[in-house]
Image (cartoon, helix red, strand yellow):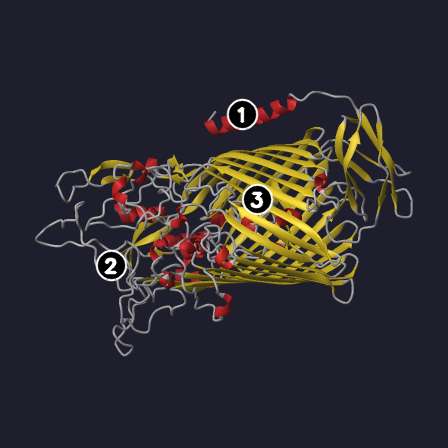
Amino acid sequence: MNRRTAGRNAILWLLLTLVGALPARGQGSIAGTVRDERGEPLPGVNVVVVGTSYGAATDLDGRFRIDGLRPGEYSVRVSYVGFETVLFTGVRVRDGETTTLDVTLREQVVVGEEVVVVGERPLVDVEQSSSAYVVSREQIEAAPLRSVQEVVGQQAGVLRDPTGLYIRGGRAYETGFYVDGVSARDPLAGTGFGLDLGTNAFQEVEVITGGLDARYGDVTSGVVSIQTREGGERLSGSFTHKRDNFGSLNESWGSNFHEDLYEFTLGGPLGTDRLRFFVAGQVQLSDGFTRHVSDPDSVRSSLVTWDFLLPRTGNRWNGFLKLTYTPWPGLKLQAAYQRSLTVNQNTRMLQVTGNEAVVAPGFQYAFILQPENANTFAHDNVLAYVKASHVINERSFYEIQISRLFTRLRADANGRRWRPRAVTTELDPRSIVTYPATIFVDESGQPFDPNALFVLPGPGLYNNGGIATRFHDHFAEEWTLLGTYTLFSTDRNRRLNAGLELKFNDYQWIDIIRPWVGAPIGSEEAEATGRLGESADIWRVKPRRGALFTTGQVRYRGLILNAGLRLEWWSPGRYVDRLVDDPRTPILETVRQAYKDDTVPFFGLRTKFFLLPRLRVSFPIRENQVLFFNYGRSTRLPHPTFVYAGLDPFYQDRSFFADLGNPNLNPEVDISYELGLRYQVTSNDVLSVTAFWRDKFDFITIENVIIRDPTGRETVRAFRINGDFARVRGVEVSYLKRIGDWFLGQMAGSFSRATGLSSTNNDALVQFLARGDIENTFETPLAWDRPIDLKASVTLTYDRPRPLLGLPGLNRLQLFLSTTFRSGQRYTPAEFKGYQTNPFTGEANWRPIYEIVSDPAARYSRIGEPWWWFDLALRRRIQLAGNDLELSVEITNLFNQKNSVIVNPVTGKAYPDVDPEKTDFTKLRGNRDFDVPINVRDPRYEDPTTTGLPPFNPARFLPPRHVMFGISYAF
């Protein structure tokens, strides 16, 4: 028995032992009558005690009786063909007694599988066979949350940090992001997200971390699904303004990010109750916590011509419009238009180019002396759809949705043209010595050499007027046709769902490094070389994707089986098909032939097919105790640049080790298993224990190949292949507690390990450039692996007109408090190699030399100091003119804790928080807390040979305490 099998068996044994240890108790019954709205009894109605194997069907008089229940609280689901399904919660059963439950069912008038809840809404679906968390609008409004990433980051199994969002050990780009059932992810940006809606447009957010349904494709981690709001029966709306800046009162405070937030909503009927609308908008403007060290005069983008939209360093604008029309019961028509624009200088907006460190924040520290010359990123996203939902009869319904997603991202040198019309000055950013120079002297102020004066180098930060070296522009247009059909059996114990998804894509990619290379020098009349930058990758393709999927559900005596199958196909497009047949294309002959062998013609394009099974099972092992298991196989298409780069024979990148696409790449694969126990102690207490493991393979990596370019010259290229793998395994425990309408608490903890050959598909490229080889056989922790993650939150609500404890003002209050404790950032340690030679004495007692350990087995082997922070939100509502005026204060990182994002590999924590302008660093010589690797500038030992960036990057810590005050008016 291998270690993995032994671990799985141990977890199963633990779960069953916990269940078996629970004491046996007495028995009671539930009985009653089910009638329609006219009072007529309904025979054959299904009455099921949720989370148990107990149930009954009503007789000819509509009566039912369920015996043998242990005392406790239960949820009872009542369902009948053609009528609404009703869930009764908090039904109490006592020993030796019969609880009466009489039910009146209304005819079904809505589309789908909606359930009417009588009593308090269940904290979770105890019969659920997957790990999914639904965050309601009320929960979102209670917490200090602005974006979907912040909402998702609060959930168990999810890690969110300045580098991205990681679900159960998966990479950031593996996440599936859906809005109203439509993929809203930018397929080219590599972040896992795209459309950036404000939280005021959310009705609820579902986060699925394990056990995906067959309808989800191109996802190998988790799914984030947003359900947006709709207009209600009456006109309603709200306006909110929050800010942290109050002029001279707090201008210098570290908690002042110079941030303003504006939100509005408006919804209701349009002339008739059958037609309703909902409009929402959000504007978030912020200079960020780094504004105290880097505050550009203006942030500009060549993609955005209206400067009014860009008043701060970070600018988020989003809007949402939805129309809902119900011409008759059973038919629902919807149309929506959603758009977001995000402009900032955060390099994490684009995560698939270059060799950036995977765990580094996106703040461009090297440009803090001239931030107007750094890269500015502008991301414009548009999602529009029309959707029809129709109940055919009492047993079936279908949905048809047509959507268009258009997303465009541009990175330029703060609004400058992609390259100057002529090169008339130095454009490469550098650190230079400026006047007046600083003479290198000893402690007594004497020059190092009396016969010659040496000056100290520049600050290590760009100060020569040079500009950012990358120009990037891409757009992705995706048309999607999605149709689903659902059929129920007469007794509703069986369900079949089937669907078809078709995607038609249009991608354009332009990525140029040092784009001024090749431009005329001196004047526009000078001759250009024709070269397009130092390196460039340019292509436009039109791939197609599609899927047939089906899921069958069977319910039998409490057991719920969901068996799904998804057949996916992928056509790289006519661009690749044509180049594969062109002998001039720099494609390896083995790859050329493999592409032809592994694809089949399908609607005029060569296509690959993939079959993905999904299985989810849940079954009660005792009343309100459900054991669940799921298995799934998922795929994620390789990033298009790995497929198409460098294939055009008429345009070849002439840079060293340029990328060469592989048209025969296969999707990355994830095989996941999950085993869990969900125990509903009462209707207000739920305990969940889940074990999961995921095997990931066919991840993209690099090998070096030699090809002949169109001139016949042999060149070495970076060729992408399916050759990497990763493993994730872990355990999650969560507990939810509710007390009346005033207390809601949640605790969640996880222990997990994520290991693999590499943390990015560029790791092998970095190794080749550094060592000249790509030999990697060591499975090591992944860069974002954080073994321990603990979260807790509590929401206290006192919504009463009478003040609490009789104290004026203590009424209609809500308090939210959350905390997160997490293992620190992983890093590769540095080892001591000796000391540099003292320039004054010639002895080896100058700067200590630390170098990153070169042993591949040490990669990300250490964990930095743990993270810990608290967030708080306090709200009070005041009645004004018959409506609600709300005052709020939101504080993130309440206790201003220092959490290391950029870990010093010498000390295992961030470089100390000191003021470089007020610190005499010579007095800190010998203090190991200030030792840094040799590639980082050490301010304690400045001499003429000093190089590297200073260690004072403000983004080396998570954001400090941030305080926002708000006012909101709702009607």
Residue placed most toward the observer, 156 or 857: 156
The residue singled out by tag 3 in the image is 872
Which numbered disc flags the more N-terminal residue, 3 or 1?
Answer: 1
At label 2, the amino acid type is: Ile
At label 1, the amino acid type is: Ala
The residue singled out by tag 1 in the image is 10
Q: Is residue 647 above or below residue 827?
A: below
Q: In this view, does 859 lie above or below 473?
A: above
State the residue at coordinates (86%, 38%).
102
Q: Do the residues labelled 2 and 3 touch (CB within 8 Å)?
A: no
In the displayed structure image, the side of residue 66 where residue 813 appears, left or right: left
Cα distance in 3D space between marks 2 and 1 = 61 Å
The residue singled out by tag 2 in the image is 432
Query: Quick one: SS at disc 1?
Result: helix
Q: Where is residue 1 in the image (x, y as percent from the top left)?
A: 48, 24
Residue placed most toward the observer, 822 or 459: 459
- Crowding near pointer 1: few (<14 within 10 Å), some, many (20+)? few
In the displayed structure image, the side of residue 472 where residue 232 appears, left or right: right
State the residue at coordinates (55%, 43%).
871
Which numbered disc flags the more N-terminal residue, 2 or 3?
Answer: 2
In the displayed structure image, the side of residue 525 where residue 753 appears, left or right: right
State the residue at coordinates (56%, 58%).
261
Between disc 2 and disc 1, the foreground one is 2
At label 3, the amino acid type is: Leu
Whether residue 210 is visible to the viewer of this picture, yes or no, is: no
Cα distance in 3D space between marks 3 and 1 = 39 Å
Q: Position of residue 326 (x, y in %)?
A: 76, 61
Cα distance in 3D space between marks 2 and 3 = 45 Å
Picture disc at residue 862: none
- Crowding near pointer 3: few (<14 within 10 Å), some, many (20+)? many
